[in-house]
Image (tube, rainbow, N blue to C red):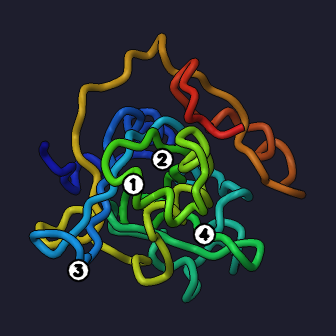
Amino acid sequence: MTRLEQPFYARKAQTLAPALLGKIVVRRLESAHSENGYVYLSGIIVETEAYGDVAERDLACHGDRANGGQPTPRTQIMFGPAGFAYVYFTYGMHWMFNVVTGETGRAGAVLLRALQPVMGVEEMRLRRNGRILTELTNGPAKLAQALAIDQSLNGANLCAADGVIWIEDAPPIPTEHIAVGPRIGLGKTPEPWLSMPWRYWIKDNSFVSK
C-alpha cells in the first residue's frame, strides 16, 4: 500500500473528509511478542467530520472558537501544515484523532469518527476490554483507544517514512455510497454551525458510530 502524501491533505476539510473514507489508518506499536518487534493495527475509515477551513470561522472548530480564531498552545497544530495529527483530550477521559487539513495559517482538521478493523483485531480487543468486533472502533474515542492513540501522537507527521501512524491509499468510495449529515456532539455550538452537514460516512456500514 502507498502512504498518502502531504498534497493529499492540503485541501479544505470539507473536501478531504469524504475523500478519506475508504482509506486505511495504520498504527505501528512496539511488541516483545512479535518476530520483528512490532505489531500493526489498522482499519478502514468509514466515518469522518470536517472542522474549520472556511472563510467564516466555524464555531464548532477548536482553532476558530478559541482566542478569537488565533492559535493557542493547544490548537497550534490545527493551523498547519497539513498532514499532521491533531490529538486532543475531551470529557476528562477520551482522546480524539484528527488529521490537519488545508493551507498553513488557517485552522482546519478532519476528525476520524469510525474505522472498520483490518489488522491487529485481537490486540484491539485487549485495549477495548474484549468488545465485539463491531464495537471496537465505532466511535472516535473507541478507535483512539483501540489503536493506542494518545497525547504522544499530537503533532505526528502522518507522511513521515519512519512514522508510527499513517494513512494508506485505497480506491475512493463512490459518491452514491456516501451519506452526509450534521456533526455529532457539538453541545451548545450555535447555528448555523450546529447543523452544518459536515459529517460523512459510508452508507450501510456496520462499523459507523451509533
Seen at 25% across and 71% down, the residue is 164
* Residue 48 in sight here: no
Q: Quadrant of residue 162?
A: bottom left
Q: Position of residue 39 (x, y in %)?
A: 25, 65
Residue at 60% x, 51% y is: 131
Considering the image in quadrants, where does the C terminus appear?
A: top right
Among the two numbered marks 1 and 3 on one chain, the one whose residue lies closer to the N terminus: 3
- Amino acid bearing label 2: Ala
The answer to whether the residue labelled 1 contacts the one labelled 2, judged by CB atoms less than 8 Å apart, is: yes
Q: Which residue is drawn at 62% across and 26% down?
A: 180
The residue carrying mark 1 is: 102
Secondary element type, mark 1: loop
Q: What amino acid is found at the position of numbered circle 3 in the picture?
A: Ala
Q: Name the residue under label 2.
A: 13
Q: Residue at x 25, y 76 (%)?
A: 31
The x and y percentages for residue 99 are: 42, 58
* Residue 104: quadrant of the picture: bottom left
Q: Which of the two marks, 4 or 3, is nearer to us in this view?
A: 3
The spot of residue 176 in percent (x, y) is 48, 11
Q: Which of marks 4 and 3 is nearer the N terminus?
A: 3
